[in-house]
Image (tube, rainbow, N blue to C red):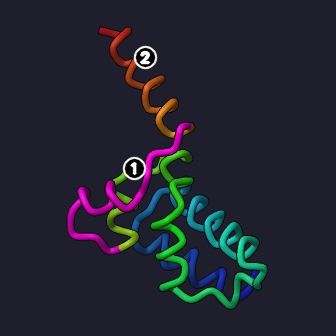
Amino acid sequence: MTPLQQRMLEDLQLRGLSARTQEAYVRAVRQRAAHYHTSPARITEEELRQYVLSAPHLLEAGVNLRLIQDAVGHTTPTTTAISTPLTDKADALARKALTGLMADR
């Protein structure tokens, strides 16, 4: 593990983010690096924030919208919801979860 990767993980842990959220961030760095054909060590914090903002894969991974809001620095969840489009996969997962909750009533 590079010193940059270690620092990122330590920062995520200090912020109290769950292991699942930390994994989502690490995955986002890898995906962003692969998308732009660059080394993960060359990604700046702002580039990662922009990639996370434009990549709804965090919602698909089950990351709470409020956590995404905090990660990208938005002041309201509305801004995050507008900036993070709901994909068909995330929509299907949400509908399945809601159906399950309603069935339990």
Q: Whole-Å distance between the Cαs marked 1 and 2? A: 18 Å
Vertical placement of residue 79 versus 104, above or below: below
Instruction: Work out which quarter of the rendered image holds the C terminus and state it.
Output: top left
The label on residue 100 is 2
Between residue 88 and residue 44, name the one nearer to us: 88
Q: How many marks?
A: 2
What residue is rendered at 47% in x and 76% in y?
49
Residue 4: give x, y in percent of width and height. Answer: 65, 88
Question: Dot 1: what SS?
Answer: loop
Vertical placement of residue 74 versus 105, above or below: below
Instruction: Work out which quarter of the rendered image holds the N terminus and state it.
Output: bottom right
Q: Tell whether 20 sits left or right of 91.
A: right
* Quarter of the view holding residue 81: bottom left
Q: Which residue is mark 1?
A: 64
Question: Dot 2: what SS?
Answer: helix
Q: Residues within 10 Å of mark 1 (few under 14, many from 20)?
A: few
Q: CB of mark 1 within 8 Å of CB of mark 2?
A: no
Between residue 3 and residue 32, name the one nearer to us: 32
The residue stretch that appears in magenta = 73-88
The amino acid beneath tag 1 is: Asn
The label on residue 43 is none
What residue is rendered at 56% in x and 66% in y?
25
What residue is rendered at 46% in x and 50% in y?
63
Task: Determine if the magenta segment contains residue 45.
Answer: no
The amino acid beneath tag 2 is: Gly
Residue 86: give x, y in percent of width and height. Answer: 45, 46
Between residue 95 and residue 100, name the one nearer to us: 95
Residue 76: give x, y in percent of width and height. Answer: 21, 63
- First in sequence, mark 1 or 2: give its number: 1
Q: Residues within 10 Å of mark 2 (few under 14, many from 20)?
A: few
